[in-house]
Image: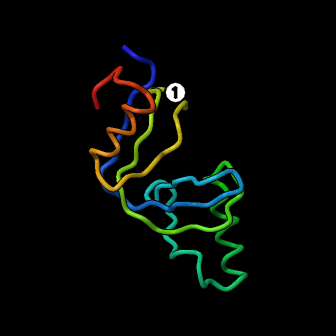
């Protein structure tokens, strides 16, 4: 049995965050943060939101947008080890991504 297991979420809301280390996806459900897109926010509200979002990102957040989709990653049950979430429009595309990136060691 492989150590890392493939995970695909149901269709949920995400924040697609642009950071100084690339794009990161953060589940709105996990964070409890439900903000509009970063465009057009007053500077003080934008900075406060980016500061709060920092707790959920590896890189320094610069902007975000709300999206809906199916998250895909590998996770080690019982451990904190996991890959970052990548979000797709369909569960089929999420499965294809996991196959392309990580092989077919386990069915999802």
Residue 72: x %, y % from top left: 40, 42
On screen, residue 41 above or below 53: below
86 with respect to 56 (left or right): left
Q: Residue furthest front?
A: 100
Q: Quadrant of the C terminus?
A: top left
Residue 94: x %, y % from top left: 35, 44
12 with respect to 31 (left or right): left
Labels in figure, total: 1
Q: Residue at x 65, y 64 (%)?
A: 52
Residue 79: x %, y % from top left: 52, 27
Label 1's element? loop
Q: Residues within 10 Å of mark 1 (few under 14, many from 20)?
A: few
Q: Residue at x 71, y 73 (%)?
A: 47
Q: Nearer the viewer, residue 33 or 98?
A: 98
Identify the colour scheme used.
rainbow
Q: Nearer the viewer, residue 84 or 51?
A: 84
Q: Residue at x 40, y 32 (%)?
A: 100
* Residue under label 1: 79
On screen, residue 100 above or below 29: above
Q: Quadrant of the N terminus?
A: top left
Where residue 103 sits, quadrant-wise, is top left
100 with respect to 57 (left or right): left
Q: Residue furthest top?
A: 1
């Amino acid at each position: 049995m492989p150590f890392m297991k493939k995970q695909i979420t149901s269709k949920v809301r995400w924040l697609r965050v642009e950071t100084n280390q690339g794009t990161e996806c953060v589940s709105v459900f996990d964070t409890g943060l439900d903000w509009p897109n970063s465009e057009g926010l007053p500077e003080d509200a934008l900075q406060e939101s980016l500061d709060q979002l920092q707790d959920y990102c590896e890189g320094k957040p610069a902007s975000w947008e709300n999206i809906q989709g199916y998250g895909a990653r590998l996770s080690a049950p019982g451990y904190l080890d996991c890959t970052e979430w990548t979000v797709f429009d369909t569960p089929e595309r999420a499965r294809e991504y996991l196959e392309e990136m990580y092989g077919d060691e386990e069915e999802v």
